[in-house]
Amino acid sequence: MVVVEVQPEYGYCVLVAVGSSFMLVWKAMKVGHLRKKLNINYPTMYSTDNNLFNCYQRAHQNTLENYPTFLMLLLLGGLQHPVLSAAGGVVWCLGRIAYATGYYTGDPRKRTRGMFGYLGLIAMLYSTGRLGTRLLGWY
């Protein structure tokens, strides 16, 4: 039987998860503010005539689409490598902010400013993979 102990450093992963929720709220507020300014009423998800609004909405929506994977990798990978996973989580969040600010220019090509966030995702993926192999006794 393999026992997984939660290391004290796992607290960093928990704090990154909490911090990431503030990033989501910030993005939601940006969309909400622009929605009000442009008079785009609910439940309209995307505008048929305002590409800037669509860029704001898409930046938020894309992060929501990737958020479950982020949390899973952060919290599971953190059981094996809490500091590496937490650092990866911070990099991912900063990448998502850079992604959004690029999108907020109205030029969707500028969203690639946040591509460095994938380095954080790779770190968390590695940590989670190591947890899986450890649990299976493969190392």
Image: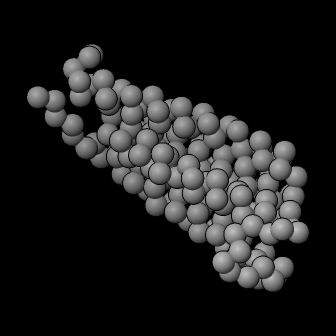
When the figure is inspected, residue 10 is found, relative to residue 48, above or below; the finding is above
When the figure is inspected, residue 127 is found, relative to residue 19, above or below; the finding is above
Quadrant in which the C terminus is drawn: top left
The residue that appears at 50% across and 32% down in the rendered structure is 123
Q: Is residue 114 left or right of residue 21?
A: right
- Residue 39 image point, x, y percent: 81, 83
- Residue 104 image point, x, y percent: 81, 59
* In the foreground, 81 or 61: 61
The residue that appears at 86% across and 58% down in the rendered structure is 105
* In the foreground, 39 or 130: 39
The residue that appears at 22% across and 20% down in the rendered structure is 137
The residue that appears at 36% across and 26% down in the rendered structure is 130
How many circles with numbers are drawn on the protein? 0
When the figure is inspected, residue 48 is found, relative to residue 82, above or below; the finding is below
- Residue 53 image point, x, y percent: 80, 67
> What's the colour scheme?
one colour
- Residue 43 image point, x, y percent: 66, 78
Quarter of the figure with residue 44:
bottom right
Q: Is residue 88 left or right of residue 45?
A: left
Residue extending farthest to the front is 48
* In the foreground, 113 or 34: 34
